[in-house]
Image (cartoon, rainbow, N blue to C red):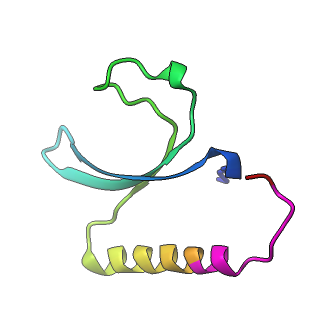
Amino acid sequence: MRINVYSQELTSEVVEIQKLSNTGLTYSAVQMILHSSERLHHPPEDDDRSAVTFWLPKSRKRRIELADTFRRMALAVELAPLETGLD
């Protein structure tokens, strides 16, 4: 699967999430909130903004590996050549 997020959709907002499943387990995630139309937002308790959600692994080892991946992505962003893309 490939997910494309365009630079015009990016925001700096990050949200931590915890969801209790019907099995009694709590799952954690981090979301990168994307720019979306204000017309989508109804009651504050119904947050239907666009986002990319990363559900976190259970083990500490795999969480560290995921954090390392995000750090490598951040470095790749900082070192990428300047382009003529849109802001």
Q: Look at the image and tell me whether residue 6 can be seen.
A: no
Residue 78 is left or right of residue 47, and the answer is: right
Residue 31 is left or right of residue 59, and the answer is: right
As displayed, is residue 45 above or below residue 68? above
The percent coordinates of residue 33 (x first, y second) are 48, 46
Inspect the magenta stretch and tell me whether residue 82 lies in it. Answer: yes
Residue 82 is left or right of residue 37, and the answer is: right
Q: Look at the image and tell me whether residue 42 can be seen.
A: yes
Count of marks overlaid on the render: 0
The percent coordinates of residue 29 (x first, y second) are 34, 55
Query: Residue furthest toward the right?
Result: 84
Q: Which image quadrant for residue 45?
A: top left
Identify which residue, 6 or 69, lies in the foreground. Answer: 6
Query: Residue furthest toward the left?
Result: 24
Query: Magenta segment, which residues?
Result: 75-85
Residue 45 is left or right of residue 10, and the answer is: left
Inspect the magenta stretch and tell me whether residue 49 lies in it. Answer: no
The percent coordinates of residue 17 (x first, y second) are 29, 49
Query: Residue furthest toward the front?
Result: 87
Residue placed at 56% from the left, 74% from the top?
A: 74
As displayed, is residue 71 above or below residue 44? below
As displayed, is residue 20 above or below residue 48? below
Residue placed at 49% from the left, 73% from the top?
A: 70
Residue placed at 53% from the left, 19% from the top?
A: 39
Q: Which image quadrant for residue 41?
A: top left
The percent coordinates of residue 50 (x first, y second) are 52, 37
Identify which residue, 21 or 69, lies in the foreground. Answer: 69
Residue placed at 34% from the left, 25% from the top?
A: 46
